[in-house]
Image: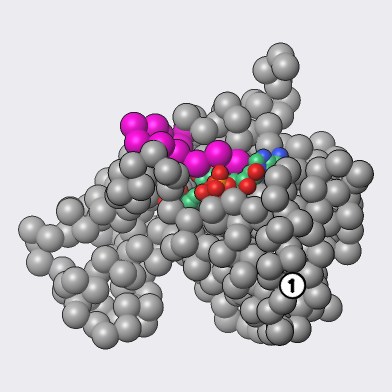
Amino acid sequence: MVKAVVLGAAGGIGQPLSLLLKACPLVDELSLYDVVNTPGVTADLSHISSIAKITGYLSPDDGLKKALTGANVVVIPAGIPRKPGMTRDDLFKINAGIVRDLVQGIAENCPKAFILVISNPVNSTVPIAAEVMKKAGKFDPKRLFGVTTLDVVRAETFVQDITGEKDPSKTVIPVIGGHSGETIVPLFSLAKPKVNIPADKLAPLIKRVQFGGDEVVEAKGGAGSATLSMAYAGFRFAEKIIKAMKGEKGIVEPTYVYLPGVNGGDVVAKENGVDYFSPSGAEKANNILSELDDNEKELLEVCVKGLKGNIEKGVDFVHNPPPK
Ligand SMILES: NC(=O)C1=CN([C@@H]2O[C@H](COP(=O)(O)OP(=O)(O)OC[C@H]3O[C@@H](n4cnc5c(N)ncnc54)[C@H](O)[C@@H]3O)[C@@H](O)[C@H]2O)C=CC1
Ligand SMILES: O=C([O-])CC(=O)C(=O)O
């Protein structure tokens, strides 16, 4: 029995993500929660003739509790998106508190659920979620994920200009690190099947993956950031988690996790000097750092420097919250 919950379900990501989950035959029950507009989104999706039974709640009258009770997968796209000129870290002030409070709800109502954090800045909101779960004595690092799948999807898509591959999703590109600018490290040298990227095209390709989010933010001109591609990516990751829950083996997908608590993660943590990082797989933190080429090693150094500050900021927020 799979009960999936979307927190922030009425938003730009929340709506199409809820649509994909509603249509997914692996989901038995789907519960939506938002502070606005959940009844309308729920009524609309409820007319779709798929397996998932759908319910929707607003914040009053224990809405969060009702949505979360019995959940085993919770996806969180709640929070404000960027406008042109902003960094993801600029969202911290508002989104940190939103994620903290929603994860507190998870700790109280469905502590064993898999938690998939989409809300930015992911580099900090995942440590926030971990600290909230730790404080509640409910933290299981194998059940908390920062969703970085959009970076993988972008790497697959953008490299197609070079490979000419008909189906870009058939080229597997590990993307490690975090989820903002230079903390995103695509590893084109480890692409499967191998890709030959001309020297003059590699740096712009890497930059495009790292700053792909900005491309959408600029194009939307103040109306938000990636929503549809994010819903696709969020669903792709959620579906893999559901398949793993149902016993499927061999699933490999980069995702931002608390390394010391995941299989093989302690080695990756020690080598990088950071506790939160996206290694190359969710089920097992494959240590591929020794396989990087010299350029990728340099990118990784820059990544780790950026990540350290983002992680500390998230951890500190839970233990020393700013005055309300
Ligand atoms: N991880 C990733 O790769 C990506 C992350 N994002 C992030 O996802 C987040 C959401 O983006 P959009 O859907 O475009 O924003 P949006 O503004 O369209 O939707 C956010 C939704 O969250 C709801 N919300 C706000 N506070 C809430 C609370 N306390 N409880 C429940 N719901 C609450 C809002 O009412 C709204 O419906 C942003 O922080 C954005 O930066 C966006 C794209 C990619
Ligand atoms: O760029 C943003 O703010 C949204 C995001 O995380 C992305 O599209 O990768």
Residue 26 seen in render: no
Residue 292 seen in render: yes
Magenta-span inclusion, residue 87: yes
Please state which of residues 161 and 259 is positioned toward the viewer in this rendering. 161
Residue 169, horizontal then vertical, whole percent = 38, 78
The image shows residue 117, relative to residue 55, as above or below, that is above
Q: At 55% from the left edge and 31% from the top edge, which residue is drawn? A: 92
Of the 4 image quadrants, the one containing the C terminus is top right
Residue located farthest toward the top when viewing the structure as drawn: 323
- Name the residue beneath numbered marker 1: 46
The quadrant in which residue 75 appears is: bottom right
| SS of the residue under disc 1 | helix
The image shows residue 213, relative to residue 163, as above or below, that is above
Residue 319, horizontal then vertical, whole percent = 73, 25
Magenta-span inclusion, residue 149: no
Task: Say whether residue 37 is left or right of residue 14.
Answer: right
Q: At 17% from the left edge and 54% from the top edge, which residue is drawn? A: 204
Task: Say whether residue 308 is left or right of residue 44.
Answer: left
The quadrant in which residue 132 appears is: top right
Residue located farthest toward the right when viewing the structure as drawn: 61
Q: Main secondary structure of the magenta part?
A: loop
Q: At 79% from the left edge and 70% from the top edge, which residue is drawn? A: 54
Please state which of residues 155 and 286 is positioned toward the viewer in this rendering. 155
* Ligand 1 under 8 Å from disc 1 Cβ: no
Please state which of residues 89 and 171 is positioned toward the viewer in this rendering. 89
Of the 4 image quadrants, the one containing the N terminus is bottom right
The three-letter code of the residue at mark 1 reads Ser
Task: Say whether residue 265 is left or right of residue 245.
Answer: left
Magenta region: 79-89
Q: At 64% from the left edge and 79% from the top edge, which residue is drawn? A: 23
Residue 238, horizontal then vertical, whole percent = 62, 68
